[in-house]
Amino acid sequence: MTSDVGTLVLLRHGESTWNAENLFTGWVDVPLSEKGLVEARRGGDLLTAANLLPDIVHTSLLRRAIGTANLALDAADRHWVPVRRDWRLNERHYGALQGKNKKQTLETYGEEQFMLWRRSYDTPPPEIALGDEYGQDADPRYADLGPAMPRTECLKDVVTRLLPYWEEAIVPDLRAGRTVLVAAHGNSLRALVKHLDGVSDEAISSLNIPTGIPLRYDLDADLTPVRPGGTYLDPDAANEAIAAVANQGR
Ligand SMILES: O=C(O)[C@@H](CO)OP(=O)(O)O
């Protein structure tokens, strides 16, 4: 079935300095690592090679996603397209785990608790304390959030806060036939993929998204993916990187 719906391209930011250091990141606004800069540009090269040129980009409010979008679009000669940014695309708020080392957390709390915090659908980590050096309660970019400002989130919370943006901002662009780039994060994109593919609460725990490799979704008129799971523009590199994300902490 053909549809007039545009094409959705999901792009997790390139490796950040805290990905490289194996630290829980969440809403902490860390930059891309050298490797991440290269991954972001390569993401743009992959878009060019696939002739998948974005008409518009949506990003989170975090520099690793913003920078990745800028570098990828520049590489694809699409640096000029309109952009929208929203906190609803931010990474999952990792609560009191923000700034903690993943390996040390695994060693301290054990595999079961570690995986519950990291990948269960509905168990959030403990809340981050107000005024914590890795908290965002005084960050001006979130000044208007009021009670919506999280101090921790599980993936279910991310689905809940992401879907209004999906419906109100991204879907209209797709309905207009645009090629829409969403540059975001491991867990905010897992939340979106869960919604798109109807992944169960259990199965989503083992779904991981690699950094810097565009994931293409062609959608039916009812926004159901034509190919469940979408298509990575570099499937071999994606498989390798997915295994690496799954093994973080070890
Ligand atoms: O630290 C984080 O914010 C995320 C993404 O890097 O980590 P994880 O894959 O462990 O959820």
Image (cartoon, rainbow, N blue to C red):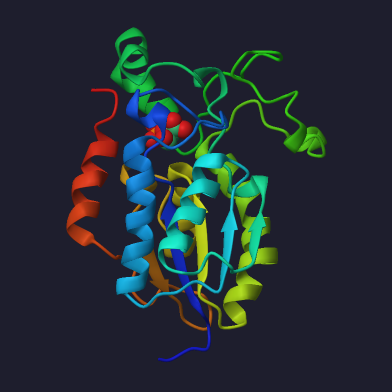
Which of the four quarters of the rendered structure image does ligand 1 lie in? top left
Coordinates of residue 105 in the picture (x, y in percent): 37, 14
Coordinates of residue 181 in the picture (x, y in percent): 50, 64
The quadrant the N terminus occupies is bottom left
Q: How many marks?
A: 0
Farthest residue to the bottom: give it: 2
Tell whether 247 sits left or right of 170: left
Residue 32 seen anywhere in this rendered image of the structure: yes
Above or below 158: residue 223:
below
Which residue sits at x=60%, y=27%?
A: 152
The quadrant the C terminus occupies is top left
Which residue sits at x=54%, y=37%?
A: 92
Tell whether 88 sits left or right of 107: right
Where is residue 234, by image quadrant?
A: bottom left
Residue 194 seen anywhere in this rendered image of the structure: no
Above or below 112: residue 91:
below
Above or below 187: residue 180:
below
* In the foreground, 158 or 70: 70
Coordinates of residue 97 in the picture (x, y in percent): 49, 19
Where is residue 146, by image quadrant?
A: top right
Farthest residue to the top: give it: 108
Coordinates of residue 100 in the picture (x, y in percent): 44, 16
Tell whether 230 sits left or right of 190: left
Which residue sits at x=46%, y=50%?
A: 68
Which residue sits at x=59%, y=48%?
A: 60
